Image: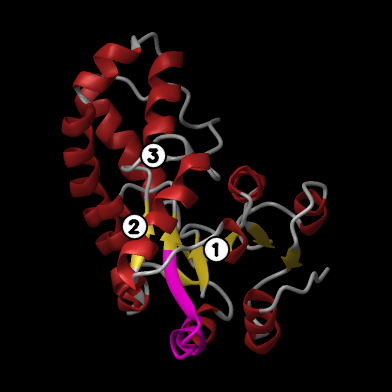
Amino acid sequence: MRLLLFDVDGTLVSARGAGRRAMGRALEAVFGVTGPIGAYDFRGKTDPQIVFDLMDAAGWPALRVRERLDLFYDRYVQDLRAEIAAGGGIALLPGVSELIGRLSDCSEAVLGLLTGNIEIGARLKLEPTGLLPHFRLGAYGSDDADRAKLPGIAARRAEALAGQSVSPAEVVVIGDTPLDIACARAYGARAVSVATGGHALQELAVHGPDVLFSDLGDASRVLTALLDARRER
C-alpha cells in the first residue's frame, strides 16, 4: 500500500487569501489584537501554531491563548465560510483534478490529507472543488500543532482503515513548503515538493525533496513518481 498525504493550501488549492483574512478577523474578535499578521509567513504552519505565534508576539501568555482557542476556532470557521463565499471561491491548482481522479482509481494507493488547517477549515476549502470524497483520511492542525507529528497520526488512521500496518517507507508527503519536506523527513517518509505555493523550485531544491515538480500539470509523470520509488528531479 502507498499512503499519499497531500497538503491543501498551495498544493491542491489556492484559497486566494481567505484563510489569512478570516484568521485576522477572528483574532481581533476573540483576542482584541491580530499581532503582526501582515508580516507573518503562514506557509507550512499549523493553524494553532499561527495563533500562538501571533498572540505571543502581541503579549498574550500561551495559557490564556489556549483558554480561548475553541472560541477562536468557532469564529474563524464562521469567517472562513463567509470569505470563501464572498472572495471569489477556491481555485484548484494545475493538474490537481486529473491527478486526484486518476489516483483514486489506483487500488494500491490510499489518499489522505496532511495539512496545518484545522479539519473543518480543510473541509471548507476542499468542498467547493468536489475532490473531498477522494480523501479517505487526514491529519490536521487540530490534531497537533506540531506538523512533524501529523504523518504518524495519518498512518495510524490508515492502518485502522485498511486493517494492515503502514511503514514510513510506504508514506509519501506531497506539499509546497520546506516544512512539508521536514515533516516527511522527521517521519521517514518520502517527500514530494511542488512549487505552486510561493516557494520557488530552487528554494525547495535546497531542502532535498525526493521529487520536485514545478506544478502537478503532467498527471502521468506525477502519478508515476508518487507510486514508484524512483527519485526524480
Position of residue 51 measured from the top left corner of the image (x, y, whole percent): 37, 29
Q: Residue at x 54, y 83 (%)?
A: 99
Q: How many marks?
A: 3
* Image mark for residue 47: 3
Left or right position of 67 against 42: left
Nearest the eye: 129 or 185: 185
**What amino acid type should be assigned to the residue bearing mark 2?**
Ala
Res 44 quadrant in image: top right
Q: Is residue 73 visible?
A: yes
As measured in the structure, the alpha-carbon distance from the residue carrying label 1 to the one carrying label 2 is 12 Å
Q: Which residues are magenta?
A: 100-112
* Image mark for residue 11: 1
Left or right position of 218 against 180: right
Neighbour class for label 1 at 10 Å: few (<14), some, many (≥20)?
many
In the depicted structure, whether residue 107 falls above or below residue 184: below
Q: Residue at x 66, y 60 (%)?
A: 190
Q: Is residue 87 visible?
A: no
**What amino acid type should be assigned to the residue bearing mark 1?**
Thr
